[in-house]
Image (cartoon, helix red, strand yellow):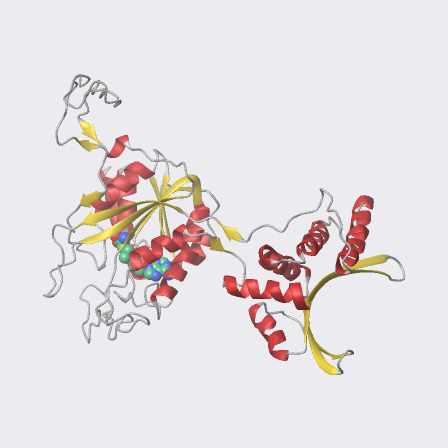
Amino acid sequence: MDNLQILCGDSLEVLKKLPDESVNCCVTSPPYYALRDYGMDGQIGQEQTPEEYVNKLVLLFREVRRVLKNDGTLWLNIGDSYVGTGDKGKHRDPKNPKGRNAQVVSKNRIVEGLKSKDLIGIPWMLAKALRDPFYTGVVKNKLDRVWLAAMVDTEGSICGTEYQTNDRQKTNIYLSITNTSLDIINKCENLFPQEVKHIYEKTNYNSNRLCYRWDVERIEQKSLFIKEIYPYLVSKRKQAILAYTFIEMQRGLSSKKKGYLKDQQEQRSWIIQSLSSLNSGIDVDLPDWVIEPPSLYEEGFYLRQDIIWHKPNPMPESVTDRCTKAHEYIFLMSKSNKYYFDNEAIKVPSKQDWGTRDRTKGKYHNEGSGLQPHTGLTKSYPMANKRSVWSVTTKPYKGAHFAVFPPDLIRPCIMAGCPEDGTVLDPFGGSGTTGQVALEQGKKAILIELNPDYIPLIEKRCLQQLLTI
Ligand SMILES: C[S@@+](CC[C@H](N)C(=O)[O-])C[C@H]1O[C@@H](n2cnc3c(N)ncnc32)[C@H](O)[C@@H]1O
């Protein structure tokens, strides 16, 4: 089946193998937080905290973003849960063929910072995290990066050396922080760990006290460290630019054995001398060939809409102090600010066709008021834009899967989000609803599912769909 790929495995790992910009849209519903146990190691939804759950999904949807074409969209169905609910005791889900317990003790029984009965707010936590720029460096906490930069500015050194060995001239860049407090040095190491030995003890000649030095080793690490601290440096910004340029030259060297090109050699010597001048308080004008360390932030998704999935037939709830939950979210997100969206394909009949009429003499046109006259409707509009509240009944699914979304819910997502001959991705394939609907519309589908027990369900649904066509 050329138009269907079913990939069994952990979706983050499988996604990493898919090529960049290869799918048109992604329509998916991840396991909700602490709601169901799919009984598999590596499953999403069983994390200890909502933050951990959201962070895991952010990592996964970053890969989805990479795999999406630049005009691609993500349609993300996600529900919420309350703190202190979800324990299923010894309940065995009849639809789980292996009869595993659903959730003896729910993960959301206690959530730090929230009270029992609080709505966690998972959908918006996730939507905002996916919209936010993603930090690709290793020092994830901004305060830690600011602290490291301040240490480099005050107690650190960005310098270079040039020395002669038997056969040739050698140059190197050093990045280090020196302090009499081992705690400070250890904190540097904790925030930006090094593979090799890098903490040195030496005597502080001014005071005869021991002091310690932390060095960033290896070229890749030096490049990354400069990118992490650069935005927050105050006094050593020029040193950082020069050191980064030097390192990039080193990394870009076509063949280390052949040595640097002549002008590169001159530039490197100039950088070493300039670093020395800057470190002695002598200012240097930077030439135009220097390279400013790039940002480590990756752009997030554009959060375009929160579509409400209204369920006319919600699960009954025995609560008496709030309304029965009858909705979930579908977030429409795009990779770029302009994206493929076939608005016409999902238009709905207008409730009322206003017809055409001239309103320029209407009662709201008040001569001399300065207001522009109503231009009136020149055309009849029997169809209207689809609204952002979608009423779709949940449909029972006979197969052995307990969290299936209804085909009617995702039909508009695929109609609007995927062009003819395009490809739809679902990294949480489940029973294969996304595959079924994509094939029904003559589109291609890639489904990823962790649990091998569900693969025959996907195959059956999709095959039936192909036979129907
Ligand atoms: C909510 S269900 C999806 C149901 C699907 N939309 C449908 O209509 O059938 C979530 C699915 O994600 C799968 N899953 C959980 N963790 C996963 C992971 N790390 N990688 C891939 N699939 C995973 C579960 O096994 C489950 O089938």
Whether residue 198 is visible: no
Residue under the image location 64 percent in, 62 percent down: 221
Q: Position of residue 250 (x, y in %)?
A: 72, 53
Can you say which quadrant of the picture contains the N terminus? top left
| Relative image position of residue 241 (x, y in whole percent) | 68, 52
Query: Can the viewer see residue 28 in this picture?
Result: yes
Res. 350 image quadrant = top left
Residue 58 picture location, percent across and down: 41, 56
Q: Residue at x 66, y 66 (%)?
A: 154
Q: Is residue 164 left or right of residue 286?
A: right
* The one of 212 and 283 positioned closer to us in this rendering: 283
**Relative to residue 205, is residue 410 depicted above or below?**
above
Q: Nearer the viewer, residue 85 or 211?
A: 211
Q: Quadrant of residue 333?
A: top left
From this view, report whether residue 206 is shown above or below residue 363: below
**Which residue is farthest right?**
166
Ligand 1 visible in quadrant: bottom left
Q: Residue at position x 58%, y 73% from top?
A: 187
Height in image: 348 above or below 56? above
- Number of marks in the image? 0
Q: From the viewer's perspective, is 363 left or right of 44?
A: left
Residue located 33% across and 72% down the image: 112
Q: Quadrant of residue 190?
A: bottom right
Establish if 48 lies above or below 437.
below
Query: Where is the C terminus found, in terms of image quarters?
Result: top left
- Which of the two residues, 299 or 262, is positioned nearer the viewer here? 299
Where in the figure is residue 335, as x and y percent of width and height?
Answer: 42, 43
Q: Residue furthest front?
A: 368
